[in-house]
Image (tube, rainbow, N blue to C red):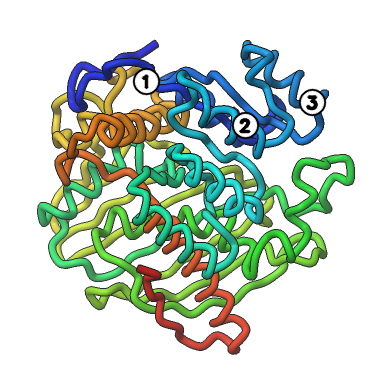
Amino acid sequence: MAVKKSGYPAASRRLRLGMVGGGREGLVGQWHWIGARISNRWELVAAAPSSDPDAALASGRAWLLDEGRIYADWRDMARAEAERADGIDAVAICTPNWTHFEIAIAFLEAGIDVICDKPMTNDLGEAAKLLEMQKETGLVLAVTYPYVFHPMVRQARAMLAAGAIGELRQVMVEYVQEQAALPADPKARKTAWKADPRKTGRAAIAGDIGTHALHLLEFVAGEKVARLRADLHVCGAPKATEDTAFLNLAMEGGAPGVMWVTQAAAGNYCGLRIRLYGETGGLEWDQENPEKLRYTRVGQPEQTIVRGHGAGMLPEAERMVLLPRGHGEALSDAWGNLYTEIAVAVEARRGGRTVAENDLVMPDVRDGARGVAFVHAAADSHEGGGVWVELRDQY
């Protein structure tokens, strides 16, 4: 297991992690579990993997949990773990979108820090309540946007902030997949809820992968989307929820932008890509080729900056490097970096310590609420015939 040489405070102990949802066949749960292990700062000790007692027990056993800490009801888990002297320090919520709010509130009320999958909620009112609850309790509420934990995303952010491309003039971000091109497998019970508009939220594709694209764009650009207009479509097999969105964006600094997100582009896998162009240069990054950052300047040879130590890597990015160049890092390592930053935040809160403002850029409840606002703004625009809509913060 890779261990970071520097960049974050040393851990005093492994934190105790609980998980709701994410049974052994659940992809999202596996990402959380892998990230926690790679970070070397967490130990999974309790879980409510499924509401089916047999399935919960099977998953808990597969994770080598004490059977006394395998729950079929997350409510029982919140109560029991809050009462234990060795109870969980934080819970990871790996359940479908519409369930996040109720679970998060229960664990916050129990005094347990929360790690929530995105979108944080489907409802603006629920997002506002979580913002209020987090502010009242002071507990950590992290939201899992893992892509910004790739070192080369940090490199792009730091280079742009340092003026490497001059004033930002235009942006493009896309997230392109194929799984909705053909009819859904009727046997795929775990994802059947994604065909139900009551459970996916007002703009399914915006919530599922559009929130990732928005967070990546705003993180790297260092500024927010001020306004957007959206057209939502079904471009794959007929279904009750849209699978494609085309959006025009207006950044706070005045730069125009485009976002394209789809799950109906046959032959594509996980194509999250971002391009930012300024007055003197451009930066391009592709999640499917995450170790390289393309840097172009007007009238100059293009550069490819490769993840590793030195050779153009800036400190903000190098602190996340786990392996030397030539030894590939991937999304699992980004999840490890995410869980490292969450651990630093949780341990600091529990120890009554303050973390320096620039030491952590962990996505939190504010980022989660912004994702919810984005989904609703996209839906408002589409339902209004493609009108421009302001993207306002909820805090």
Question: Which residue bears the numbered disc 2?
Answer: 77
Question: Which residue bears the numbered disc 3?
Answer: 55
Tag 3–tag 2 contact (CB < 8 Å): no
Sequence-first disc among 1 and 2: 1
Tag 1–tag 3 contact (CB < 8 Å): no
Q: x%, y% of residue 299? A: 13, 57
Residue at mark 3 to residue at mark 2: CA–CA distance: 16 Å
In this view of the protein, can residue 324 be seen by the observer?
no
Residue displayed at 69% across by 29% down: 23
Sequence-first disc among 1 and 3: 1
Q: Dot 3: within a 10 Å radius of its alpha carbon, few (fewer than 14), some, or many (20 or more) residues?
A: some
Of helix, strand and loop, which one carries label 1? loop
Residue at mark 1 to residue at mark 3: CA–CA distance: 27 Å
Sequence-first disc among 3 and 2: 3
Q: Is residue 279 left or right of residue 379?
A: left
Q: Which mark is residue 41?
A: 1
Of helix, strand and loop, which one carries label 3? helix
